[in-house]
Image (tube, rainbow, N blue to C red):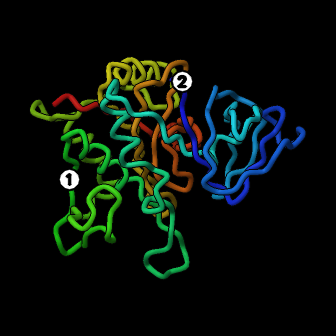
């Protein structure tokens, strides 16, 4: 089944090969839809929030075939009931403007909403992540899924990592550690992929580094195969992103947890 992607950059170049030096076939504006034929590793390009990605989509768009930088494409998918996790990811949709990085405190720095996105995806699957009380405020209305009936703010990504760890340590816990290895290890990624492919919920969770780096959380896609693919909100918000593009150097401190119920 073909996948559909939507361009999020103001303008994105369709190229003859997965390389920013290759010939430009056309340039397409924000919102353009493309049929995703394949996702491959090509030459690295810069990301707006720093860092790089080497992920490219081979696409068909406006009657032309070529390559688009995958980090600037939101995978809108084709939910058809074959995967509950994918259906939840596409319904909530990391590409919605609600989850994009923006300054909501007025301090001149853009906040990110990985915890909000993850909590909303899991909510569609009947899984509750801990949320703060009413004093913390609710979502800016109207919300794309909840409309005006918005839930309270979820725990921060840092607090969610601690929550998962505590759940794993308890004999009654509903969340379990997938592997003792961290997410930069092939063994941990293989275990996460194996569980997720059964349409089971698996999250990648980073605890953050006090005073220097915020925590992060993402949902592992059940169609991950040779490598882990994730859905996340963040500096780059995407329904289909390479694990390394979402977590970068934090992989050595990132863990996978699965919901056991």
- Of the pair 160 and 131, the residue shown nearer to us: 131
Residue found at the far left of this picture: 172
Q: Which residue is mark 1?
A: 130
- Of the pair 177 and 66, the residue shown nearer to us: 66
Query: 10 Å neighbourhood of mark 1: few (<14), some, or many (≥20)?
Result: some
Q: Position of residue 96 (x, y in %)?
A: 46, 56
Question: Residue at left 36%, top 24%?
Answer: 196
Left or right: 236 in relation to 221: right
Residues at marks 2 and 1, CA–CA distance in whole angstroms: 29 Å
Q: Is residue 195 above or below residue 28?
A: above
Left or right: 216 in relation to 71: left
Question: Residue at left 20%, top 41%?
Answer: 127
Left or right: 172 in relation to 205: left
Question: Residue at left 75%, top 45%?
Answer: 45
Q: Position of residue 30 (x, y in %)?
A: 64, 57
Q: Which residue is mark 2?
A: 227
Q: Which mark is residue 211?
A: none
- Of the pair 213 and 193, the residue shown nearer to us: 193
Please tell me which of labels 2 and 1 falls first in the chain. 1
Q: Are marks 2 and 1 in contact (CB under 8 Å)?
A: no
Residue found at the far front of this picture: 63
């Amino acid at each position: 089944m073909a996948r559909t992607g939507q361009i999020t950059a103001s303008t994105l170049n369709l190229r003859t090969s997965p390389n920013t030096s290759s010939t430009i076939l056309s340039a397409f504006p924000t919102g353009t839809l493309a049929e995703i034929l394949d996702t491959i590793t090509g030459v690295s390009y810069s990301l707006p929030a720093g860092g790089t990605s080497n992920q490219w989509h081979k696409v068909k768009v406006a009657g032309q075939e070529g390559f688009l930088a995958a980090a600037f494409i939101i995978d809108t998918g084709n939910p058809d009931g074959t995967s509950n996790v994918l259906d939840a990811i596409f319904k909530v949709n990391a590409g919605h403007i609600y989850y994009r990085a923006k300054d909501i405190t007025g301090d001149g720095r853009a906040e990110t909403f990985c915890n909000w996105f993850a909590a909303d995806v899991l909510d569609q699957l009947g899984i509750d992540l801990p949320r703060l009380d009413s004093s913390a405020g609710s979502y800016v209305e109207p919300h794309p899924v909840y409309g005006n009936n918005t839930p309270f703010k979820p725990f921060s990504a840092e607090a969610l990592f601690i929550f998962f760890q505590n759940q794993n340590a308890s004999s009654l816990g509903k969340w379990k550690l997938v592997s003792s290895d961290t997410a930069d290890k092939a063994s941990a990624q293989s275990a996460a992929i194996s569980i997720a492919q059964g349409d089971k919920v698996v999250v990648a969770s980073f605890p953050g580094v006090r005073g220097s780096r915020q925590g992060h959380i993402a949902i592992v896609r059940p169609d991950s195969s040779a490598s882990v693919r994730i859905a996340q909100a963040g500096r780059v918000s995407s329904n289909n992103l390479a694990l390394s593009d979402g977590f970068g150097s934090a992989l050595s401190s990132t863990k996978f947890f699965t919901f056991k119920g």
